[in-house]
Image (spheres, rainbow, N blue to C red):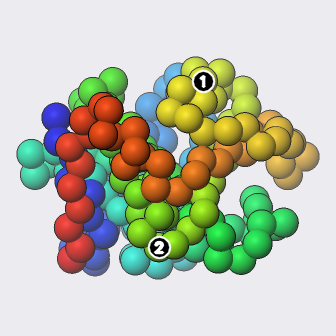
Amino acid sequence: MEVEVRAINRQTLPAFSAILGEAAQWLDEMGNGLWLFEEVSPEGLMDQYALTECFMGDVNGVPAATMVLLESDARFWPDVNPGESLFLHKLSIRRQFAKQGVARQMVMWAENEAGARNKRYLRLDCAADRPKLVQWYENLGFRRIREQVMFEKFPTVFFEIDAGSAWIRSRHRPVGSRCSRL
């Protein structure tokens, strides 16, 4: 299954939001609520991010996944040197594409994008109380940097991986993701 990653625009923002809304609903149903629906609405997303920071992955022309890539993230990574990292947020996969390698391809694309932007690291944070997710990132090669309770409420794990390392790994395990910029 090949994933084509592309930057979103005003026309694709509703599809981007719908994928995040579907993920938010699924997480709520599983008892692991993460995002408020207002946060992942088109308006809520535009209050937080620029369109140029939002990327969608398509499978056979069907929107399947989302992620946000930030050049800085002082809220979660205040001690990081400016310009050395790209930060991954809002990775979500439509349920119909779950467990088919789509998430892995999105993350590997983000790693390569970080390298293309001359960043040293791709960094992310995730809920520490989701051991399968934590293990998944570790299996992808991310290094655990620290654990911290954020906002006096959320146990969080912080990860990093060397930018561009996905290209090296993909030479041994085919990835097949492409990028187009709109």
Q: Identify which residue, 147 or 65, lies in the foreground.
A: 147
Secondary structure beneath dot 2 equals loop
Name which quarter of the figure residue 34 lies in: top right
Image depth: mark 1 or mark 2 in front: 2
Q: Position of residue 113 (x, y in %)?
A: 41, 63
Q: Which residue lies at the image location 56% right of the left edge and 68% below the top edge?
A: 119
* Quadrant of image for the C terminus: bottom left
Dot 1 crowding, Cα within 10 Å, few <14, some 14–19, many 20+: few
Q: Position of residue 59 (x, y in %)?
A: 16, 44
Classify residue 28 as left or right of residue 2: right
Hey, what amino acid is under mark 2? Arg
**Do tag 1 and tag 2 residues touch (Cβ < 8 Å)?**
no
Q: Which residue lies at the image location 28% right of the left edge and 77% below the top edge?
A: 10
Name which quarter of the figure residue 79 lies in: bottom right
Q: Which residue is mark 2?
A: 117
In this rendering, the answer to whether 2 lies above or below 13 is: above
Q: Which residue lies at the image location 82% right of the left edge and 41% below the top edge?
A: 146
Residue 135 marker:
1
Spatial CA span between label 1 and label 2: 27 Å
Residue 161 marker:
none
N-terminal label among 1 and 2: 2
* Quadrant of image for the N terminus: top left
